[in-house]
Amino acid sequence: MQSHDTLPGGPGRLAVLQRHLVAVPVSGQVSSVSHPTDFQYTLDNGVLSLAQRQFYEENGFLVVKNMVTAGDLEIYRKAFEGICKKEVSAPGLVVMRDVAILNSEYVPDQKAITKIQDFQEVPDLFNYCTLPQILKYVECFTGPNIMAMHTMLINKPPDAGKKTSRHPLHQDLHYFPFRPADLVVCAWTAMERIDRSNGCLVVLPGTHKGTLKQHDYPEWEGGVNKMYHGIRDFDPNNPRVHLVMEKGDTVFFHPLLIHGSGMNRTAGFRKAISCHYASADCNYIPVKGTTQEGIEKEVAEIAGKRFGINVELKDIWSFRGRLLAGTRTNL
Ligand SMILES: O=C(O)CCC(=O)C(=O)O
């Protein structure tokens, strides 16, 4: 990341540049004239500092400390508990279980729940996606027409010795049939302290500048969880950053950023909550003949079994998406 005092022209020039940046309206095209560099991945609404913008542009992620209060996180944890105990259910909600872990934390006779997805109809969880302090940041990536497209609460179980609690390195765009990718962002919030012992996120900085890669199920001895596809062809020399985060810290990241998470070596279930946001101005793309054709089939098969209907990937996303700000233009 470039430090302020290394900018050409020194601190005086920086002050002028910052005044320009703040003056750019949020809904307008970002002008390349008033910027010291060409920004491709961030818009200016006066929320991100110049340093934060440059960091995201260069690395494809940005951690913001203390974004979500302990009180809100407790509401999300309780709602999750209610779902595990089958006290709460909702249309579209998907509950996923670990291939190897036999004991759930709240219902010991059930296989461990590793993740719930699509909680847009569970108000106590969907509240996370609507938090104004998060949306303020999201707008810097999506612009003003903001949709919540994909929601997850990830409950990484203690590993049973088979390493199945790992999440293979992947790009989230693999799952999404809408573009442009630069108008999509994930917010992922630690619901407790998350470090290498309980399986923090690991990111490969700068990989958001690459293209979408082929994803497959990894050949792991202990088995792999449903839909946990991974990339085989990534540069092993690309530096990795382990994101150690405190409870309430949030990372925003680009959907092409290669990331995954490690094994949970502790006895507790490690929790994080996330939402993928996209600009409603994005468009659905056909995925036939692309690396995403396989995932479309897998998702359509699951939906077919659950709901007895024949659907295309874009129909599922259009059903999942919820407008949070601005106008629902395309998605
Ligand atoms: O929370 C984690 O362990 C990683 C989640 C993740 O990358 C995903 O579900 O796409």
Image (spheres, rainbow, N blue to C red):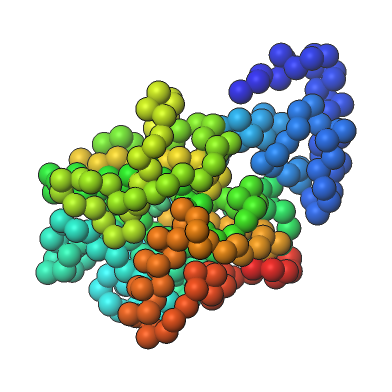
Task: Report x, y in % for residue 162.
Answer: 14, 46
Is 204 on the left-hand or right-hand side of 87? Answer: right
Identify whether 312 is placed above or below 216.
below
Residue 26 position in % (x across, y down): 79, 50
What residue is rendered at 45% in x and 33% in y?
A: 204
Expressed as whole percent of the image width and height from the top left, the position of residue 93 reads: 39, 73
Left or right: 177 in relation to 99: right
Residue displayed at 40% across by 60% down? 294
Outermost bottom residue: 308
Q: Is residue 143 left or right of residue 256?
A: right
Give the vertical position of 7 relative to 94 (above or below).
Answer: above
| 135 to 81, vertically: above or below | above
Q: Nearer the viewer, residue 192 or 283?
A: 283
Residue placed most toward the observer, 206 or 290? 290
Apparent side of residue 268 relative to residue 24 in the rendered image (left or right): left
Q: Quadrant of the N terminus?
A: top right
Which residue is depicted at the point 26% across and 56% down?
Answer: 225
Residue 84 location in percent, x, y?
Answer: 27, 70
Q: In which quarter of the view is residue 131 placed?
A: bottom right
User: Number of labelled discs?
Assistant: 0
162 vs 95: above or below: above
On-image quarter of the C terminus: bottom right
Which residue is rendered at x = 30% and y = 35% of the image?
Answer: 196
Residue 124 visible somewhere in the drawing: no
Place residue 314 in its image quadrant.
bottom right
Regarding residue 308, the answer to whether it shows in the image is: yes
